[in-house]
Image (cartoon, rainbow, N blue to C red):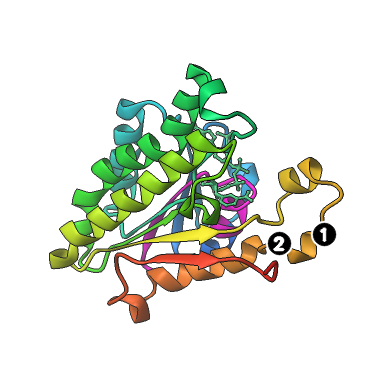
Amino acid sequence: MKDRVVLITGAKGGLGSFVTQRFLTTGARVVGTSRSISKEDFPEPNFAPLPVDFTKPAAVREAVETVVSRFGKLDVLVHVLGGFAGGKTVAETDDATWEQMRDLNLTSAFYVLRAAIPHLRKSGNGRIVAIGSLTAVEPHVGLGAYVTFKSALATLVRTVALENKDAGLTANLILPGTMDTPANRKAMPAADPSKWVQPGAVADLALLLTEDRAAQVTGTVIPIDGTNV
Ligand SMILES: NC(=O)c1ccc[n+]([C@@H]2O[C@H](COP(=O)([O-])OP(=O)(O)OC[C@H]3O[C@@H](n4cnc5c(N)ncnc54)[C@H](OP(=O)(O)O)[C@@H]3O)[C@@H](O)[C@H]2O)c1
């Protein structure tokens, strides 16, 4: 990965911080985005922070162009960014929740894919890995907005895989179950976090999908569910 330029969204979140750290250990040039990210978040020479709000299409396009003009290319996109809201039936869901779930879980992916694909195609062995959710494989009471946009994300990523096979660009989606993140520990204090998916294991899978040995793996949707079976 040493000569590869990697763009990671949601880079300082519960999962994103593991993904970012994992790619940094490979020696790749890693650009991490979130609204508030800074150099102090990952004080390593091969890390570059790029603050950007992914609900703004012009800002996303500008961020991708900044990466390419600064590092000369883009080889890998790991789209970790997403957001969760639950507890309301569809009939109770307000506009703000619907729009937030749409913007964070689906539209952000569309914006960054649209901007990044032309550059990833030029890489010759470009890679896209996106993070969905195991929960969103089936409908769930009280999670209508979240599962709707996460399942649409799977269709979007699989379409991108089909459209870019000719350029050696792969696109795959990982579906984690509940992960052992600080936010989940706080939200579910009575649960046993050892049963949850380890974010480090998801980061390892994301890295594997970007390696040369995964060149023929594309259009897949891969669940990772820890030991909570
Ligand atoms: N946590 C779980 O158990 C779980 C399970 C299955 C799937 N997932 C999925 O895994 C992914 C990561 O989840 P997580 O729990 O690690 O998320 P998280 O901790 O909430 O992190 C979200 C990240 O996105 C950034 N972000 C939020 N809004 C943004 C915006 N408008 N523009 C740019 N960046 C923004 C945040 O940083 P800033 O605040 O600095 O912007 C943060 O870095 C998501 O796609 C989620 O749906 C999570």
State the residue at coordinates (73%, 47%).
184
Q: SS of the residue at dot 1? A: loop
Q: Which quarter of the rendering shows the N terminus?
A: bottom left
Q: Is residue 35 magenta?
A: no
Name the residue nearer the viewer: 109 or 102.
102
Q: Which image quadrant for residue 199?
A: bottom right
Q: Which quarter of the rendering shows the C terminus?
A: bottom right
Residue 193 horizontal/vertical position (percent): 78, 59
Residue 185 horizontal/vertical position (percent): 79, 48
The answer to whether the residue labelled 2 contacts the one labelled 1, judged by CB atoms less than 8 Å apart, is: yes
Label 2, ligand 1: CB separation under 8 Å: yes
Residue behind mark 1: 192
Q: In this view of the protein, can residue 78 be seen by the observer?
A: yes
Judge left or right: residue 179 versus residue 75: right
The label number, if any, that marks residue 200 in the structure image? none
- Crowd tier of the residue under label 1, counting other residues whose Cα lies within 10 Å: few below 14, some 14–19, many 20 or above: few
Judge left or right: residue 220 versus residue 33: left
What is the magenta range? Answer: 1-20
Q: Quadrant of ligand 1?
A: top right
State the residue at coordinates (63%, 65%).
200
Judge left or right: residue 219 versus residue 51: left
Residue behind mark 2: 196
Query: Hey, what amino acid is under mark 1?
Result: Asp
State the residue at coordinates (60%, 66%).
225
State the residue at coordinates (59%, 34%).
85
Up the image or down, 35 lies above or below 14; here it is: above
Up the image or down, 126 lies above or below 141; here it is: below
Name the residue nearer the viewer: 165 or 52.
165
